[in-house]
């Protein structure tokens, strides 16, 4: 089975489900934009040409994209999003969702993907679903001392946008404490966050 055939099956069986939930397709990337919340679903070919990854991304339009800069909401890719995950294949599929050796295997895999969307796919987007509620909950449920310094920066930016200066300061302080010594650009971004 090849990528083109597998993608046609996804377009026939999975994409209509996503479109019914408000996603708009451009190629193998689907986006849903509601207010400042941007959701991205992307099919990415794996190396070797026999499988793909199903990438999930969530972003807020007031945040810089991952890697810096600004990307227009309808052009944002999963790699630009500050919140990312993947829909994982069943155990044993070490490198993505296998296209399968036959049409039957490919159809079975796509049917499983559609069923998985109902659980992990929707759950990811629900966690990043509504602004400001989902993000207020995320901030409240996050221990600043248990996250990566870069995550502290993203959440600190959200806290500033929501007017929660106390939480922003806690995130910045935790991020500065956890940032590696050589992460000078990250430290500078964290320090600037509370100056504005």
Image: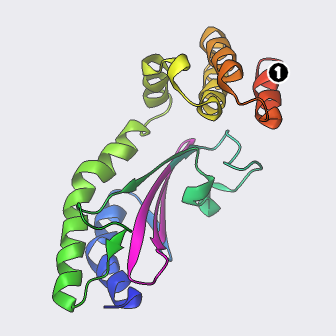
- 135, 107: nearer the viewer: 107
Q: Secondary structure at mark 1?
A: loop
Please tell me whether residue 145 is drawn above or below residue 36 in the rendered image.
Answer: above
Instruction: Specify whether 176 is left or right of 44.
Output: right
Please tell me whether residue 150 is drawn above or below residue 20 in the rendered image.
Answer: above
User: In the image, what residue occupies the spot 82% across and 33% down?
Assistant: 184
Q: Position of residue 42 (x, y in %)?
A: 47, 65
Instruction: Specify whether 21 is left or right of 81.
Output: left
* Quadrant in which the N terminus appears: bottom left
User: In the image, what residue occupies the spot 77% across and 29% down?
Assistant: 181
Q: Residues within 10 Å of mark 1 (few under 14, many from 20)?
A: few
Q: Position of residue 101 (x, y in %)?
A: 24, 89
- 97, 141: nearer the viewer: 97
Q: Position of residue 178 (x, y in %)?
A: 65, 23
Q: Position of residue 138 (x, y in %)?
A: 45, 26
Q: Magenta part mainly helix, strand or loop?
A: strand
Look at the image and give the residue range highlighted in magenta: 29-57
User: In the image, what residue occupies the spot 54% across and 42% down?
Assistant: 35
Colouring scheme, one of rainbow, by chain, secondary structure, one colour: rainbow
Please tell me whether residue 189 is drawn above or below residue 5 in the rendered image.
Answer: above
Q: How many marks?
A: 1
* Quadrant in which the C terminus appears: top right
Q: Residue 31 lies in magenta, yes or no?
A: yes
List the residue tagged with mark 1.
196
Instruction: Specify whether 8 is left or right of 44.
Output: left
Q: Residue 85 lies in magenta, yes or no?
A: no
User: In the image, what residue occupies the spot 57% across and 41% down?
Assistant: 36
Residue lying farthest to the top in this orientation? 166
Residue lying farthest to the front in this orientation? 181
């Amino acid at each position: 089975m090849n990528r083109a055939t597998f993608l046609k099956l996804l377009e026939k069986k999975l994409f209509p489900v996503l479109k019914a939930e408000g996603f708009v397709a451009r190629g193998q990337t689907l986006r849903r934009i509601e207010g400042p919340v941007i959701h991205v679903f992307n099919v990415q070919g794996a190396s070797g040409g026999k499988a793909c990854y199903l990438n999930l991304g969530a972003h807020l339009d007031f945040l810089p994209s991952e890697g810096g800069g600004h990307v227009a909401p309808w052009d944002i890719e999963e790699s630009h999003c500050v919140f990312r995950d993947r829909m994982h294949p069943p155990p044993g599929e070490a490198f993505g969702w296998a296209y399968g050796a036959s049409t039957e295997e490919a159809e079975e895999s796509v049917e499983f993907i559609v069923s998985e969307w109902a659980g992990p796919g929707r759950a990811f987007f629900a966690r990043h679903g509504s602004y400001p509620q989902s993000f207020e909950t995320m901030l409240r449920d996050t221990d600043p001392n248990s996250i990566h310094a870069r995550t502290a920066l993203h959440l600190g930016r959200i806290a500033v946008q929501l007017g929660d200066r106390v939480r922003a300061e806690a995130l910045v302080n935790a991020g500065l404490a956890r940032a590696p010594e050589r992460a000078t650009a990250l430290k500078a971004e964290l320090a600037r966050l509370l100056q504005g």
